Image (cartoon, rainbow, N blue to C red):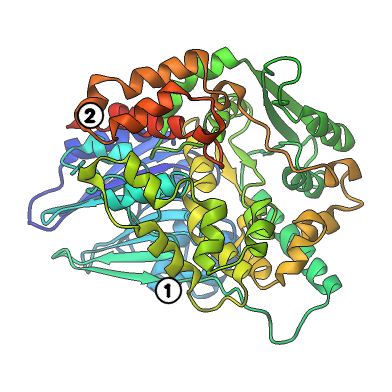
């Protein structure tokens, strides 16, 4: 829930309240229910509220605890806030609200910066200590909730979205050449702390930063993922029972931490169907929502999974809503989605989430979604391919994941932006970190802690929150991920992948959904580069702004435009190389150029 922003001055000047207002305005869609500001000396906070827990004015933010001399802006949800509240009350703390925001303030006072290790949830927050004049920032373990920073010698600013920081002004919008290499190699993933702009950084997942009055920064990583086998081996039955218990608890936590109805985004796949199965007997009249797209005609790839989502909705008698989107609407609404992107994201799922969230938000404020299950439990086809490959961990990973190799990148990017093969170095270092027994343990840890953060997790926050819709991801409960990370890879890959989830789903949801091939239904209007979509990209890549920016080598662009549908011109993962180039340029024209 919510959008947050703030400014801390290091130079003795008061915070720029006009800049704070400019940052707060673009966050209104994240929090349409309430707004507030707070100032104390060099510090100013802004907040836009989406009311989900404690709907009363007592939970208004910025939240100020006069007795403790602490102030807070918070985006997210603590699923264990009731347990923490009881523990704090036993220590003598008295509460003036009923939500999770005040629990963060009291926890910080009681346990200091390590309080974050007690939190189970998704969060990005800032706490101002009025006594020490220190600012404390924190982000959840999987970076489900975003936090962008821009810092100079004079001040720090932070916000829930990158465009909000740009609206504040004074941001260095020079392109970061290292980040560009990551962006074009890792399917638009730019791992924290970088973004494509030199002047904007992201607080990394599972980390905190403390800012002293003079601008000194102290950072800490408070959680890492252990991917080693347990000392006492577990049987298959024990692994499955532990998975069932942990997932059930994860779903229950995310259901109970809400004072509004909670629905499910039902794709028709195993993961979301399993969530419906676990919720159906706990939620009377459970709301479910599915999206599909217009087919391109006879012989074309099917663009919806209604066949399966309808089965689940009927089996559990949910209050089901399904939406079929015309290709003409996809193209017409694409500019809106680009405008709402906090960072450039190439996946076709981005527009799908944007259009689905618009419709769902008219009915509920909170939904659960199956994101993360494939990465955590080994559901993608490339994992066994990687496992069967030979060579170094980097070689095995890169040949099945990288969008393009370094040689092709050098042919694509202009000389002014060329760097060494920085992405290979980044990935090799990440794979080779300790606490991973086997190669796939290394891969799944990298996925869960780095890659997933800036691909599916980012779009699942960014696009729904543009409509004031909070998405909760039970498969990214950190205790469930810790359990899965220690499983033998063979157990997860058994029976075509995600065996633990298939096993616990058996008897709960229909076998036809469990045993179906994994779906990758497309967004046809964006998958096939032709007609109006091709002309749209041609216009972007031949525009005066694109030529002036000089980001791409023109012969590479011209070659793609000349033969966009040839197989060699498509990336292996989600979409074409042409769309990849056009998307970044389009995003820069919308978000960066007006602020230069």
Q: Tell me, for residue 356, which label it has, or none.
A: none
322 displayed left or right of 93: right
* Residue sitting nearer the eye, 540 or 103: 540
Q: Earlier in the sequence, mark 1 or mark 2?
A: 1
Q: Quadrant of residue 444?
A: bottom right
At x 78%, y 54%, the residue is 496
Helix, strand or loop status at disc 2:
helix
315 displayed left or right of 542: right
Badge 2: residue crowd in 10 Å (few <14, some 14–19, many ≥20): few
- Residue 71 lies, with reference to residue 291, above or below; the image says below
Residue 224 at least partly seen: yes
366 displayed left or right of 487: left
* Residue 549 % position (x, y): 22, 32
Q: Nearer the viewer, mark 1 or mark 2?
A: 2
* Residue 356 % position (x, y): 60, 28
Badge 1: residue crowd in 10 Å (few <14, some 14–19, many ≥20): some
Q: Which residue is mark 2?
A: 593
Helix, strand or loop status at disc 1:
helix
* Residue sitting nearer the eye, 413 or 588: 413
Q: Which residue is mark 1?
A: 114
User: Disc 1 versus disc 2: distance between alpha carbons?
Assistant: 41 Å
Number of marks drawn: 2
342 displayed left or right of 44: right
* Residue 280 % position (x, y): 81, 43
- Residue 399 lies, with reference to residue 299, above or below; the image says below
- Residue 58 lies, with reference to residue 589, above or below; the image says below
* Residue 426 % position (x, y): 40, 63
Callout 1–callout 2 Cβ contact below 8 Å = no
């Amino acid at each position: 829930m919510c959008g947050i922003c703030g400014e801390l001055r290091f130079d003795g000047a008061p915070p720029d309240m006009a800049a704070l207002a400019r940052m707060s305005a673009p966050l209104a869609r994240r929090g349409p229910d309430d707004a507030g500001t707070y100032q104390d000396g060099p510090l100013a906070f802004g907040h836009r509220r989406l009311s989900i827990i404690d709907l009363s004015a007592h939970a208004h933010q910025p939240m100020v605890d006069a007795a403790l001399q602490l102030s807070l802006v918070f985006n997210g949800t603590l699923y264990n806030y009731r347990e923490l509240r009881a523990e704090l009350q036993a220590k003598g703390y008295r509460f003036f609200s009923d939500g999770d925001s005040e629990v963060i303030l009291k926890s910080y006072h009681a346990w200091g910066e390590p309080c974050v290790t007690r939190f189970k949830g998704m969060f990005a927050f800032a706490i101002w200590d009025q006594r020490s004049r220190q600012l404390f920032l924190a982000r959840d373990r999987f970076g489900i909730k975003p936090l962008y920073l821009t810092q100079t010698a004079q001040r720090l600013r932070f916000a829930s979205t990158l465009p909000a920081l740009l609206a504040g002004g004074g941001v260095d919008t020079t392109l970061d050449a290292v980040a560009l290499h990551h962006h074009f190699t890792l399917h638009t993933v730019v791992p924290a702390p970088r973004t494509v702009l030199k002047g904007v950084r992201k607080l990394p997942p599972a980390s905190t930063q403390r800012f002293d009055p003079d601008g000194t920064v102290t950072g800490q990583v408070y959680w890492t993922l252990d991917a080693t086998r347990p000392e006492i081996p577990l049987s298959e039955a024990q692994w499955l029972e532990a998975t069932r218990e942990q997932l059930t608890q994860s779903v229950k936590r995310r259901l109970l931490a809400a004072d509004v109805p909670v629905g499910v985004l039902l794709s028709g796949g195993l993961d979301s169907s399993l969530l419906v199965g676990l919720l159906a007997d706990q939620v009377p009249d459970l709301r479910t929502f599915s999206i599909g797209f217009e087919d391109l005609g006879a012989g074309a790839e099917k663009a919806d999974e209604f066949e399966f989502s309808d089965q689940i909705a009927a089996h559990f008698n949910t209050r089901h809503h399904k939406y079929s989107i015309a290709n003409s609407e996809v193209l017409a609404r694409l500019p809106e989605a680009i405008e709402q992107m906090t960072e450039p994201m190439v996946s076709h799922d981005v527009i799908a989430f944007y259009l689905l969230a618009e419709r769902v938000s008219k009915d509920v404020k909170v939904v659960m979604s199956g994101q993360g299950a494939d990465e955590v439990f080994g559901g993608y086809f490339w994992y066994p391919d990687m496992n069967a490959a030979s060579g170094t961990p980097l070689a095995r990973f890169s040949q099945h994941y990288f969008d393009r190799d370094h040689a092709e990148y050098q042919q694509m990017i202009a000389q002014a932006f060329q760097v060494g093969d920085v992405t290979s170095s980044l990935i090799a270092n990440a794979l080779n970190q300790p606490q991973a027994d086997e190669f796939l343990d290394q891969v799944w840890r990298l996925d869960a802690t780095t890659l997933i953060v800036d691909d599916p997790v980012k779009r699942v926050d960014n696009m729904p929150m543009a409509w004031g819709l909070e998405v909760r991801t039970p498969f990214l409960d950190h205790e469930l991920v810790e359990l899965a990370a220690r499983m033998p890879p063979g157990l997860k890959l058994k029976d075509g992948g995600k065996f633990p989830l298939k096993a616990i789903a058996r008897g709960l949801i229909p076998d036809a959904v469990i045993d179906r091939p994994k779906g990758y239904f497309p967004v046809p209007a964006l998958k096939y580069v032709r007609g109006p979509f091709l002309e749209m990209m041609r216009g972007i890549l031949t525009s005066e702004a694109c030529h002036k920016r000089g980001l791409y080598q023109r012969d590479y662009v011209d070659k793609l435009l000349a033969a966009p549908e040839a197989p060699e011109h498509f990336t292996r993962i989600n979409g074409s190389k042409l769309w990849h180039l056009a998307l970044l340029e389009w995003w820069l024209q919308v978000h960066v150029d007006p602020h230069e």
